[in-house]
Image: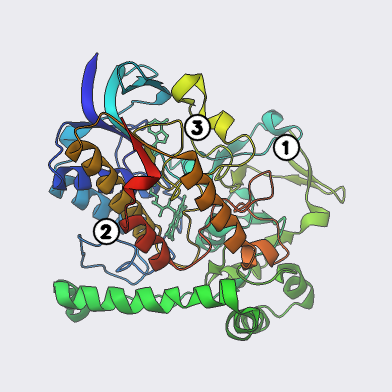
Amino acid sequence: MQTYTAIIIGTGFGGQAAAINLKNIGITDFLMLERRAWMGGTWSQNSYPGAAVDVQSPLYSLSFEPYKWTQMFAEQDELVQYTNHVIDKHKLREKVKLNANVSKVQWDDDKQLWEITTDDAGTFHAKFLINASGPLSTPVIPDFKGRDSFKGKSFHTNNWDHNYDYRGKRVAIIGSGASAAQVIPAIAGDVKSLHVFQRTPHWVLPRPDRKFSPLMRSLLGSTLIYKALRTAIYWTLESRVIGFKYSKTMLNLVAQRQSLKNIKAQLHDPKLQAAVTPEYTIGCKRIILSSTLYPALARPNVSLHTKDDGIAEITETGIMTRKGQKLDVDLIIYSTGYDATDGVISYPVIGKGGRSVQDAWSEFPRAYLGTTLPGFPNLFVVTGPNTGIGHTSAIFVIEAQLEYIMRAIKAVQSKQAKSIEVTSKAESDYTGMIHEEMKKTVWKTGGCHSWYQSKSGHVIAMFPGFSFTFRGMAKAFKPAHHIFR
Ligand SMILES: Cc1cc2nc3c(=O)[nH]c(=O)nc-3n(C[C@H](O)[C@H](O)[C@H](O)COP(=O)(O)OP(=O)(O)OC[C@H]3O[C@@H](n4cnc5c(N)ncnc54)[C@H](O)[C@@H]3O)c2cc1C
């Protein structure tokens, strides 16, 4: 069995950034394991029509890899080009094993190594294990009554079947979150009919997108200008935390009013206006950025079904609604999201004494800096509990976590130790602080139920504060919070 200094699970931006950071500290003896037949994560996987980032691209990019974006909010194909540019530039293809679905990882306390088992790509040993398997990478399809009896075509947005031609077809889309809001306008004009099943409406704000002119693109080639634009975007987005955490009045005045105005301006049917207007405070669920969703919902071939007219049953030919309407459709698109909290690591992780992460998280997922857990030496979870950020780029937080991870690894090396483990006290103080701070946020008090919450009711997906606060904590590595062996 081959032993590596480090193994990284996943090849999205988290895995890529981890690999590049390892190289930067002189560790080249590492392997990346990827369950798909390709590298890239989120944007290589999510190729549904309309897929695009909703954080401005100069910020939604690795800090050390600027790019001459063609538009402010890059679309999926450009994000894939960027991903491949990063992978090729840093020679990561030679470090990866594809089609390697990790099925179990186990700590061997005698050897002070992780044993990583894949379905059929072999078993490996590694000193350090970096899990970058993604916060939104395992799709969920609820167990609707009759789901498997449907004889037409169906797929999740995460797994779009491009061999299926949806044009001219009768289509139903289940879900109305961020992915659905991108798919609906992208396909509404091409399908015969579109039934949208919305359980809870989302607040929607216009998307301030713009194409970059050739001049602007060439300016983006200057590191100085790229940095300046990135910084300006960063601070504009960061100011949203004031609303999310400290001032409901500001949220109301700045965002909720604008969103209400948008509804009135784009939808003229009072019934439709009421159906898309949320009852909770803006920000409680992820805010959708779209200038095309409402016009699509107003199209004559599009029908919006709210919760009271939701899905009673899926039949062989389509959907039976709660109001008893029988809708025959050719295609059902599941835009039903991901397991972002309780099941975020989709394979068993067995630590010291045979205790699993799943056991450690039976109450709710928790980790020091969202990254390390007592009882799991040398394990680092990228985008772990409470590292999500609704207002800015997830890549910023990934890079902040890597500041901590690299400092931890360097500390093990400089002490010539075999392992590092966060103390129970440091983890429980950190988690206590997180959930105390969370009480002040709109995610806790905004009156919604969202995928940010685990089954315990705790908000797990989000960090309750400014992203620079998180980064500051991640950079200030505290040896006293850790045990070295
Ligand atoms: C549709 C969509 C839109 C998004 N839009 C935004 C946005 O606008 N702004 C933003 O900040 N964030 C957005 N996100 C969040 C996004 O997940 C992060 O921005 C970022 O891409 C996460 O990178 P990652 O490497 O952690 O995870 P991912 O990109 O999900 O990569 C994880 C990788 O791990 C692999 N993997 C998982 N399990 C295993 C296993 N058992 N064995 C081997 N490999 C495994 C997966 O196949 C995948 O390649 C979006 C997510 C989705 C799904």
Disc 2 marks which residue? 62
- The image shows residue 247, relative to residue 137, as above or below, that is below
Tag 2–tag 3 contact (CB < 8 Å): no
Which image quadrant: the C terminus? top left
Q: Amino acid at mark 2?
A: Leu
Tag 3's secondary structure? loop
Sooner in the amino-acid sequence: mark 1 or mark 2: 2
Residue with the mark numbered 3: 346
Q: Depth check: 318 or 177 in front?
A: 177
Give the label, 1 or 3, closer to the camera. 3
Residue 396 % position (x, y):
35, 60
Q: Quadrant of residue 351?
A: top left
Residue 264, position in %: x, y?
68, 83
Closer to the N terminus: mark 2 or mark 3?
A: 2
What amino acid type is highlighted by mark number 3? Answer: Ser
Q: Amino acid at mark 1?
A: Phe
Which image quarter: residue 104? top left
